[in-house]
Amino acid sequence: MSIDQIPQIEEFRPLVLRVLNDRQARSIKDIYRQVADLAHLSDEDRAQTISSGQPRYANRIAWACSGLFHAGLLSRPKRGWYEITDNGVTLDARSVTYYSDRDMREWSKWVDYQEEIASRRKSASNADQASSHDSTTDPLELLETGVDAANAKTETELRQMLQSSSPEFFEKAVIELLWAMGYGGAHGEKEHVGRTADGGIDGVISQDALGLRQVCIQAKRYQDGNNVGSGAIRDFYGALRERGADRGVFITSSKFTADAARTAARFNGAIVLIDGIRLTSLMLDYGIAVQKSREFTVFDVDENFFDDDTV
């Protein structure tokens, strides 16, 4: 089977659902093997690799699983494992053999996922320009646009993973972010307060060795549609005053209501709001919960070489 004959992502999606339709959770490695067997891939097919060294069929199956997850057709019971959802069973019963991105739009979770990715891109015009491969476009601009698009997808997936984490994990993650951003200074300390009777304060970063200047943190791991309202902002401000702190950061994985933003603004900069979109953008900027996937080297002509008489 040639490269073009190995099933595409759209063809692997139904096969993944078929493998998982017994409702048993499986590791991604088991899914690779069972889907490859179901697709009757030869040893030659399985030996083909992409530039990173990953088997080509495994890469496509991984993307198929990821897409099905973001559409709500699969769930992730734990890292590296998938199981089918009720919607996935429903789709599998239709016995489709090809399921494209356009087909996936019948699921609202997929639509929301794609819309968030689109909203994170710097400009629709740049994206359109990149997709058209206009010969007048600077190749470096095309490369930058591609990187922006890839990072937008990563940010969106990261936010969804944070929303599926435990509240305690989310609290610790945002503390690590603020620490990486330098809020602790050279001699500060960080503390996860968490589920204690401390007026809703989830974390504290002391900006000096004596703790005289503190940044208090409130973290709300909310799902989409459950936005932080003005009441939570007022409660947080009260907790800051009770603790004697003059500044705080309120972070959520969802959004803030307009009233919440206006309430925070009335406190003259005492409270900074960070919603889920900005949160994951900052996490990429400061390398929290992400790793570099690959780097590209772009070469320019060294004109000095041609001025060297010793060549």
Image (tube, rainbow, N blue to C red):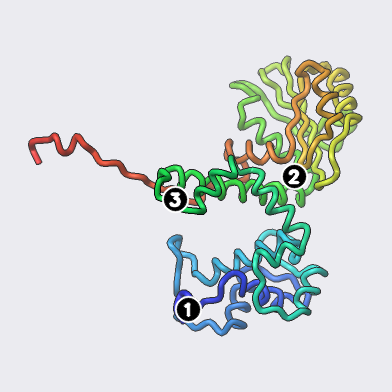
On screen, residue 180 versus residue 115, left or right, reads left
Q: Position of residue 259 (x, y in %)?
A: 86, 29
Mark 2 is on which residue type? Answer: Phe
Is the C-beta separation of discs 2 and 3 under 8 Å?
no
Q: Residues within 10 Å of mark 2 (few under 14, many from 20)?
A: some
Distance from disc 3 to disc 1, alpha carbons, whole Å, reads 34 Å
Element under disc 2:
helix
Residue corresponding to mark 1: 45
Element under disc 3:
loop
Q: Position of residue 49 (x, y in %)?
A: 45, 69
Q: Quadrant of residue 198?
A: top right
Q: Which of the two residues, 159 or 255, is positioned nearer the viewer here?
A: 255
Q: What label sits on residue 134 in the rendered view?
A: 3
2 or 3: tag closer to the N-terminus:
3
Residue corresponding to mark 2: 169
Name the residue furthest left: 310
- The relative height of residue 85 versus residue 93 in the rendered view (above or below) is above
